[in-house]
Image (spheres, rainbow, N blue to C red):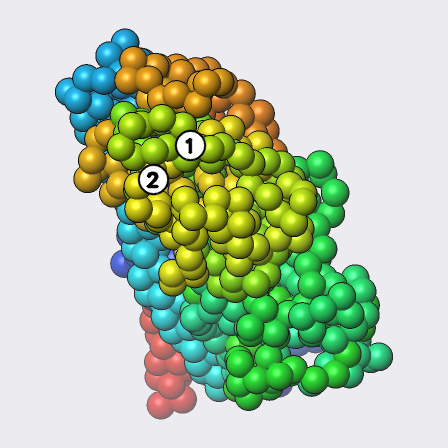
């Protein structure tokens, strides 16, 4: 190969092209200085080959070999993790502030204030037990308390419904992003030729989509180059695999089973009701689903099997596997077993120890592998505070679902526990008291699903059946004309006292009829106890160590058991004489000025009562302290979310700044490059001009 004007001309031409490429790339950088997600680019120049020549090797110029994108993959991977946590805690903080405002007691109309007024009204009526104005104040202040409890619970429920709508929209957005990322992978496979035709714009677009997905859920990525790019959840569920993509679904309540190899059960589990917790059913005793002692037994966990439901003594609770007719009550659900095709069909086969069923009684988030395989990834927080790492743990989706179930769910559970305890403790006292007149007729407000099952059974359907104890229940009968005591006795259950493990509602009715034959007639109407005095008689209630009348809703102040169904017993609102202010004394007398029951009601304000929560177990505290603890929990949760958001926001911002130091466009640097590349372009053009002049000189010599 010879050197001369032609080789210099080629050298100038390649130099001109290289400078032009550099100017083009610099212009692209300057144009996209404000484009979100744009990564700075630069042209890579490479020396041309050298040729051995005399007096030594001579170069052949320069070539622009590729345009590269400046992007730190390691920093980006760390950023995705921190941004998911930032958005999780940021979303939680935003939502929890709404709960804080809802439970704000400064207005004087919150639950704490109305609960205090409820107790104060009992104190006022204790000073004038026979005053109808004071009696009416008790009813009025109770109505205000009920309205407040119901409004708070309704507002919390509406928050959960709103969260469901937001989650559904974000699931749709996440699915769209997965599709777009897989399509970008496909385009990258077509257009990207590593080292010569880098698809930098497509890589930037993919990185933007991945960041958007990381805002919704915690993800990790595996980049094997080009379009061979995989996106997974932190728990390992594949979302995008090259050109393939999976999806998420936000589904209605679901159930699933996991039977051991030795199990012969051929049926299905069924449930009725709703709850914010997920139920894990784990069998601990072999056997069939039956209504007798041969039934298999299971335990229940509401936090994924980390802890199991216990009784008041801390002993693990075991439940019998029942069919539809004998379905059992477990916390917020009725649970039973039926055939594979019918909830009321007869289940067949035997359960084996280790058989497991899962009930999700609320809308849940599922990772869909294919049409027949769906795996629940709804965030779950164990009662020890740890997160279930096999589910979503980051991003706004995890925050919203955790807020709905683990925060709002916990608050509503505590509010319901407060209401249930208030109802029971009030009714427990009121049912043993006496008003200004005796009863001619009274109807129970709490019914059972079976009138022949033991009232203490978990399948009898009695709301307060678990509160019953073995004991005695006294009833007093009066001559209606004279008002004098005609008889009094404890209910006789075939020569013994009441036992909740043995006696049914039918047994209670029989005990009343046998104990007070000719004076009181007991019937069961719509699965509730109905008591009616025979002509010429009236009756009242006394000491009830079993809690039987309170559990059946006889001579009670409240009916219902939750914020949504609690009411004042219409027997009282219809006739204030039945508001129990006093009691039947040792002589069997009902005195108008007696304030024994009202003082007991007011004392409940400071009384230590047992309140059970599935998350916190049983605590002994006052009703007011329990509610104030709920408000305190909301404040602590809000502050924790605020702190964590600030912490992860700082980390994410720092990582983003580190990425921008690599990928961001610096206008000062680009302007400097622009001047330099322009000078290079001009020099290359001058080189071409010089080579041309040399050729012209050579040509003129020949002529």
Residue 390 occupies quadrant = bottom right
Image check: 594 left or right of 469?
left
Question: From this viewpoint, which residue is outermost toward the left?
Answer: 133
Q: Is residue 297 visible?
A: yes
Q: Are marks 2 and 1 in contact (CB under 8 Å)?
A: yes
Residue 426 occupies quadrant = top left
Marks 2 and 1 sit apart, C-alpha to C-alpha, by 8 Å
* Residue on which the image places disc 1: 486
* Residue on which the image places disc 2: 537
Judging depth in this view, the residue of 270 and 664 nearest the camera is: 270
Label total for image: 2
In which quadrant is the C terminus drawn? bottom left
As drawn, 458 above or below 545: below
Judging depth in this view, the residue of 188 and 696 nearest the camera is: 188
Residue 559 occupies quadrant = top left
Q: Secondary structure at mark 1?
A: strand
Image check: 494 left or right of 359?
right
Look at 57% across and 67% down and name the residue there: 327
In which quadrant is the N terminus drawn? bottom right
Coordinates of residue 694 in the picture (x, y in percent) = 40, 75
Question: From this viewpoint, which residue is outermost toward the right?
Answer: 262
**2 or 1: tag closer to the N-terminus:** 1
């Amino acid at each position: 190969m010879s050197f001369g004007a032609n080789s210099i001309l080629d050298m100038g031409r390649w130099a001109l092209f290289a400078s032009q490429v550099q100017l083009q790339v610099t212009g692209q950088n300057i144009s996209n200085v404000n484009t979100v997600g744009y990564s700075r680019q630069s042209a890579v120049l490479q020396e041309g080959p050298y040729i051995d020549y005399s007096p030594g090797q001579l170069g052949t110029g320069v070539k622009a070999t590729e345009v590269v994108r400046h992007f730190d993959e390691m920093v980006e991977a760390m950023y995705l993790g921190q941004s998911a946590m930032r958005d999780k805690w940021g979303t939680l903080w935003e939502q929890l502030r709404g709960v804080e405002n809802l439970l704000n007691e400064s207005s004087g109309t919150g639950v704490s204030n109305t609960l205090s007024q409820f107790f104060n009204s009992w104190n006022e009526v204790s000073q004038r037990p026979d005053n109808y104005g004071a009696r009416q104040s008790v009813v009025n202040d109770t109505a205000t308390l009920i309205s407040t409890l119901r409004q708070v619970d309704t507002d919390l429920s509406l928050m959960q419904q709103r969260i469901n709508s937001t989650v559904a929209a974000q699931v749709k957005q996440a699915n769209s992003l997965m599709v777009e990322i897989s399509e970008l992978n496909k385009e990258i496979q077509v257009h990207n030729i590593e080292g010569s035709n880098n698809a930098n714009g497509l890589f930037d677009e993919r990185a933007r989509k991945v960041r958007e997905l990381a805002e919704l859920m915690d993800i990790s990525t595996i980049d094997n180059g080009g379009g061979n790019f995989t996106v997974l959840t932190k728990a390992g569920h594949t979302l995008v695999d090259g050109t393939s993509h999976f999806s998420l679904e936000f589904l209605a309540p679901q159930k699933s089973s996991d039977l051991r190899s030795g199990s012969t059960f051929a049926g299905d589990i069924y449930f009725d009701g709703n709850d914010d917790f997920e139920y894990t059913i784990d069998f601990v005793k072999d056997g069939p689903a039956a209504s007798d002692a041969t039934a298999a037994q299971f335990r229940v966990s509401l936090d994924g099997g980390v802890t199991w439901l216990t009784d008041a003594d801390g002993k693990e609770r075991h439940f019998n596997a029942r069919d539809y007719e004998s379905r059992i009550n477990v916390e917020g659900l009725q649970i039973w077993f039926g055939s594979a095709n019918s909830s009321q069909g007869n289940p067949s086969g035997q359960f084996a120890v280790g058989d497991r069923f899962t009930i999700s009684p609320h809308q849940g988030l599922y990772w869909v592998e294919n049409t027949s395989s769906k795996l629940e990834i709804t965030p779950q927080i164990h009662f020890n505070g740890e997160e279930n790492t096999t589910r979503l743990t980051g991003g706004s989706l995890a925050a919203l679902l955790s807020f709905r179930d683990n925060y709002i769910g916990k608050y509503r559970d505590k509010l319901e526990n407060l209401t249930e305890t208030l109802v029971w403790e009030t009714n427990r006292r009121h049912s043993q008291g006496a008003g200004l007149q005796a009863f001619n007729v009274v109807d129970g407000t709490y019914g059972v699903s079976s009138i022949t099952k033991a009232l203490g059974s978990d399948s009898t359907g009695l709301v307060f059946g678990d509160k019953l104890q073995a004991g005695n229940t006294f009833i007093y009968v009066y001559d209606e004309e004279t008002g004098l005591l005609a008889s009094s006795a404890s209910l006789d259950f075939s020569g013994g006292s009441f036992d909740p493990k043995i006696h049914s509602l039918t047994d209670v009715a029989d005990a009343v009829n046998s104990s007070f034959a000719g004076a009181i007639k007991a019937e069961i109407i719509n699965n509730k106890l109905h008591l009616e005095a025979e002509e010429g008689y009236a009756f009242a209630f006394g000491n009830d160590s079993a809690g039987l009348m309170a559990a059946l809703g006889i001579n009670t102040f409240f009916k219902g058991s939750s914020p949504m169904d609690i009411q004042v017993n219409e027997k009282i609102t219809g006739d204030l004489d039945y508001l129990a202010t006093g009691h039947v004394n040792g002589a069997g007398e009902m005195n108008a000025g007696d304030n024994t029951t009202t003082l007991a009601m007011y004392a409940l304000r400071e009384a230590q009562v047992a309140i059970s929560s599935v998350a916190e177990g049983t605590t002994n505290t006052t009703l007011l302290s329990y509610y104030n603890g709920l408000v305190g929990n909301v404040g602590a949760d809000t502050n924790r979310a605020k702190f964590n958001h600030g912490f992860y926001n700082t980390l994410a911002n720092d990582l983003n700044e580190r990425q921008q130091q690599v990928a961001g466009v610096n206008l000062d640097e680009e302007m400097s490059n622009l001047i330099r590349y322009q000078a290079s372009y001009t020099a290359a053009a001058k080189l071409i001009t010089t080579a041309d002049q040399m050729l012209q000189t050579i040509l003129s010599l020949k002529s």
